[in-house]
Image: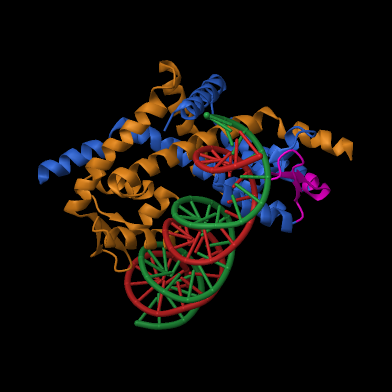
Chain colours: A blue, B orange, C green, D red
Amino acid sequence: MTRRGDQAARAANSQLVQDFGLLIKAATRLEQRIDTALRRECGISHTMLEVLIRLCRKPGEEVSQRRLAEDLTLTSSGITRLIDRMEEAGLVCRVPSPEDRRSVWVEPTDHGHTVFLEAATVHSHVVERYFVTPVARDDYTRLTDALSDINEALRNAAD
Amino acid sequence: MTRRGDQAARAANSQLVQDFGLLIKAATRLEQRIDTALRRECGISHTMLEVLIRLCRKPGEEVSQRRLAEDLTLTSSGITRLIDRMEEAGLVCRVPSPEDRRSVWVEPTDHGHTVFLEAATVHSHVVERYFVTPVARDDYTRLTDALSDINEALRNAAD
DNA sequence: AGGATTTCGTTGAGCAGTCAGCAATTGACT
DNA sequence: AGTCAATTGCTGACTGCTCAACGAAATCCT
């Protein structure tokens, strides 16, 4: 009984657990901060900004809901409802794909472009302040390298 | 019009945006993976594990709901409902604090300890595989240093 | 002491996502 | 060509959180 308590304490205090906790905490806190800033100053959520980023990246390229779902790690129904809200807010519009009649393309409206430019400014201020500045100059590239490696490992995993 | 599109494309393609995207993606994907593994193999969510970690850390120390809320970046009502579910699942129990009658202490039950030990194993396997292994040996400490710095900056921020 | 302010937890209402099941379309295999 | 499987997006029912408002307890301020 006491034995198990000690065992549990050891597990709870492992370095692995602490380190991983840092990642989760940093990400959620950063996202929250960006989200509230965006809501207050531009009236959109962080998720919506992530959509707009993808839509504005390559002006010619068409982006399907499916692609957005994978990119944002949302389910297809999650994307459906998200795009519903964004369409209602006048940020994007749906265009039926001429190539594949199951598929729907999402395009930014003029208003979407405008809001995106405002939001991008807010976004980069927060990121600059809490993500770039606090990190030592030569740790920064290590950090992004490490994050790329993690993402790659996750992408290549079968399960 | 075209001008604004180009401007938007530039903003969407900025290195800052890409880098930050890596962090968010890595964190959410990792969390999802852990969550589904835990649900399948132990019947608890990742959030519940985070609670159990805090409860088992120092066996003597009492942990209030408030403290949990801050640590997990949840609102107090979020914690109330989370602890409701965990209590119902027999993982923890609430104990009124004798020091402050507004406050409630949360303690792990025997069953909570047992489940925690199982869950910690699953957790560390996933973390080992997708967080530690993919990252180059001397990038790892840089990564955790950077994450600590970010968290510190977030904690010290007034707003 | 005693009234204003703050803190802790709870509750109702609402929001943003999931999961399971569906219809329409497309691709793959003989 | 013709069936069978896979893919794409949508919907109903649900989950897990937030926000706003609250009551009870503690703290502050004269």
Q: Identify which residue is drawn at 30% across, 46% down.
A: B54
- As for residue A103 lying within the magenta part, the answer is yes
Tell me if residue A9 comes above or below residue B88 in the rendering: above
Q: Identify which residue is drawn at 54% across, 28% down.
A: A135
- As for residue A95 lying within the magenta part, the answer is yes
Q: Nearer the viewer, residue A150 or D14?
A: D14
Q: Nearer the viewer, residue B77 or B84?
A: B84
Residue B32: image x %, image y %? 44, 41
The total number of labels drawn is 0
Magenta highlight range: A90-114
Q: Identify which residue is drawn at 48% across, 26% down.
A: A156
Regarding residue A112, the answer to whether it shows in the image is: yes
Q: Quadrant location of residue B106?
A: bottom left
Q: Quadrant location of residue C15?
A: bottom right
The reply, left or right, for residue D17 in relation to residue A33 is: left
The reply, left or right, for residue A125 in relation to residue B138 is: right
Tell me if residue A141 comes above or below residue B4 in the rendering: above
Q: Nearer the viewer, residue A147 or A83?
A: A83
The reply, left or right, for residue B51 in relation to residue B141 is: left
Residue A72: image x %, image y %? 58, 41
Tell me if residue A47 comes above or below residue B76 in the rendering: above
